[in-house]
Amino acid sequence: MINGRAPWSESLSSLRVPNFRLFTVSNILAMSGTWMQRIAQDWLVLQLSHSVAAVGITVAMQFTPMLLFGLYGGLIVDRYSKRMLLMLTQGTVGLLAVLLAVLALTGTIQVWHVYAIAFVVGLVTVVDNPTRQVFVNELVGPRNLRNAISVNSSVFQLGGLIGPAVAGILLDAVGAGWAFAINAATCVVTVLTLAALKKSKLVRSPAVPRAKGQLQQGLRYVVRKPAILWSIVMVAILSVFALTMPVILAAYANDIYMVGASGYGLFNTLVAGGALAGAILSTRRTGVRLRTVVLMGGLWGALQAVAAFMPSEISFGVLLVALGVANLLFITAANSLVQMSSNIGIRGRVMSLYVLVLLGGQAIGGPIMGWVVSSYGPHVGIAISGIVPAIAAVIIGIHLARRHQLRIRVSVEGRTPRVTIVRRIDGGFTA
């Protein structure tokens, strides 16, 4: 795919589309509420159970439905109105947030309540998340899709910047219940916004009729497209290991630095702040290549491994910002490459597989990393969570280089080393 950078004046070009602009404003509130609920939920479980492993189980309960049923969510997305599906899913998530709020505010909440509600939210996510991914194309059309994906990522990280910070304050001041209540309110705003969109301006994709073998068709399509396949493999590895950071950060806040709920919120805010910076940078990129996805995934893993050796809370916090930048650059590159490499008629199924490994991987990784942290400590946990993806990126990079008969050539011009990737042609190599 062609790679390059757009001028700064075009960094937010997709927001010139009125429907997308309205959706983005409501999405900022929705993502802030989502992050608030996740932080409050994890911290509440930690306080009720006094176990980091229990936090890992909570993560697993929320993401296991995607692992089990994610591909079926893609079929639903390809067959029905994306706007109507989002209204239904957001309305359901809002009702579940109300239930959590009532249980927390009345003091009757137990760990199993959080597990059960997290699992039902996960079931809703099976449809909500791939729908949200594909709906962006209907809002802006193919011309603005790449920029809209980056803007969407910026909004998600802006929510990750606001939500954890507010959640940390609320957890210390009034408890988790009000964080859940605010998330319920943001879901109402999202539903009302979706209802207000101008349907005539949507770039609708044709519904895919029912037919046998549609799941297998989607899987075969992914396997035949190396750019999609290897992007999804990298996402799977990073989601199992690196995306378990909330579990690890809870342990750092509670056991290493002893900074409580507000500190836990701050750690997550630092990651989101770096990610927001990465998202803003990504809006200028006009294209992306597979090697960018692999490189950013390896960088993310390497930085996360280095975090284990930070000597102080300040240096740890600084590295969390860098982690956020690498995280977002990887996620945006992978998301863009997968969406833009797939045909619109099958994109729902492709994105459901992408979301399956992105969220379902956390269902596997949450309990694993929770056990590692409980057994060997947060330093070992964060080191493993970074080393494994970094090694995987190196192995995948070597495999792709050999497959395409590529090698790295290092030359020196004056005193400046120059690194280029060259391709083998008729017994020789060419840049």
Image (cartoon, rainbow, N blue to C red):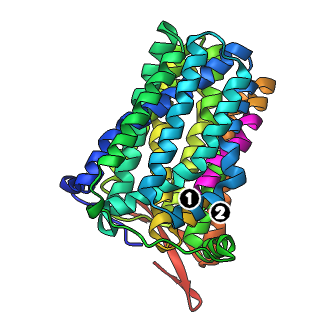
Q: Secondary structure at mark 2?
A: helix
Q: Which residue is mark 1?
A: 294
- Give the vertical position of 187 relative to 376 (above or below): below
Give the class, few, some or many, for how many residues have Cα within 10 Å of label 2's Cα (few <14, many ≥20): some
Q: Which residue is mark 2?
A: 396
Disc with the residue nearer the chain's start (1 vs 2): 1
**Which quadrant would residue 284 be assigned to in this image?**
bottom left
**Which quadrant would residue 392 be assigned to in this image?**
bottom right
In front here: 93 or 234? 93
Q: Is residue 303 left or right of residue 147?
A: right
Whether pointer 1 and pointer 2 mark residues with C-beta atoms closer than 8 Å, the reply is: yes
Query: Does any portion of residue 118 appear in the rendered image?
Result: yes
Residue plotted at (69% across, 76% down): 213
Residues in magenta, as a range: 354-369
The residues tagged by marks 1 and 2 sit, at their Cα atoms, a distance apart of: 8 Å
Residue that sits furthest to the right in the current view: 375
User: For the stretch drawn in magenta, what is the main secondary structure?
Assistant: helix
Q: Amino acid at mark 1?
A: Val
Q: Amino acid at mark 2?
A: Ile
Give the class, few, some or many, for how many residues have Cα within 10 Å of label 1's Cα (few <14, many ≥20): many
